[in-house]
Amino acid sequence: MRVKQDFVSYLKQAILDINSSDWPTWCYIHASDLYYNKTVEKIFVDIFRTETPWASFPPRDYDKNPEAYCAWLITNGLNYSEQSIPSELLDYYMSAAEPERTAGAIRRKYPYHINDAKNYRQLAVRAIFKAGTACFNKQLNYKAITDPTIGPKSRGYWFNAALVSGLWYYDFFMKQTLNIMFGPLIHDEYPFLGATTPDWCADNTYCERWKFHQTAPDDFIFSSYGAVLPAGISVGSIRIKAEGDNSEGSPGDPDVLDGIIGFQALNEDGEATGDISFVYANPIGSVWDTPQALFSAGPGTTQVYIAIFLNHGNGDYFLYFQDAQIISAVSKLERKVYGAAGDSFAWDVGQGLFSFDSFVPS
């Protein structure tokens, strides 16, 4: 059976890296890798399988977390590049793995006819469909509704939008997307002259800009959003920068403005399930920075609280925010992207002179 050797090599190295560091760190570093999602799915399918385990998997009562799983694989010498088939199942395996024989010859079914004059059309259709699936993978993987004017929406948005159609949300998304990618008319044909890229497939290039003036030590704003996290350690981060606001006549220096960003896990009643953790941005500066912190989440965590405390401001400022990310200990990326026009952070002001200004290109 065919196996992508590049993925096998990536998976083997991922197991070694997770074992030598930890799961949240590995997820944070590799979240944009080609085989990241496939590796996460492979590991969790193996961990939470329900069938009777064979010799090549941990016993059913083994700790069900990625670090323990990878440690078990290394200790027991499992090699993903080799297959171990029990002898009593070999005949079944070979019959399933071999191509069907017809008239004494092995035949292969190609997705299109070789030397067919219409190949270029079929390849064009395939390229558009693959672009549609790539666009779906860009949509934000969480249940809350995020609906920016430009940039990826959340899967929760697509699920909610698909309810009246009677379609599964993936089918609804592909229908809406391909109708635009192939062209505005139902019967558009090659070369698809009316084809365009949907706004929700475009990269998020906007951030939100806030005005700020220091009034007292530890002026702060805060926000919370839904993120169901398992008990354990998670990683929180946010992109931020500052610049002096010339419109008020007394621009502040971004290189003296210090920031403290706090992350805390909360339950549905707004009660803390773990201690708040802080990361320092001293100074915030005029160049995009992404401070990150490890924080603990207890049972029943359904939202994450983020607070930004500011000190030593010496004038008027513009503050810029874009992405906030949470990587949990035993799940895929919980990600919330803000800063696209139409979907702001929804900050609450705790103390100080803060006011939303506008959405601007980042």
Image (cartoon, rainbow, N blue to C red):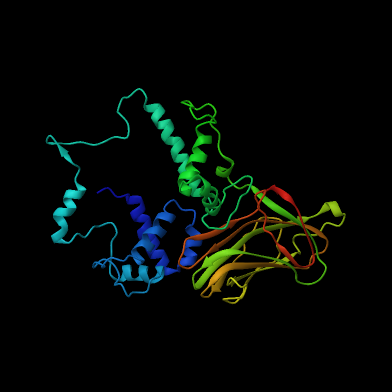
The quadrant where residue 89 appears: bottom left
Q: Position of residue 145 (x, y in %)?
A: 58, 55
Residue ID at (35%, 60%): 12
The answer to whether 248 is drawn above or below residue 55 in the figure is above
- In depth, the one of 216 and 222 nearer the eye is 222
Residue, far right: 249
Front residue of 315 and 69: 69
Q: Quadrant of residue 356?
A: bottom right
**Above or below for 25 versus 114:** below
Q: Residue at x 38, y 63 (%)?
A: 44
Q: Position of residue 151 (x, y in %)?
A: 59, 46
Q: Residue furthest left?
A: 104
- Residue at the (63%, 47%) spot, across then down: 205
Whole-percent x and y of residue 137? 48, 49
Lateral position of residue 337 relative to residue 29, left or right: right
Viewer-side residue, 318 vs 108:
108
Q: Residue 259: image x %, image y %?
A: 70, 66
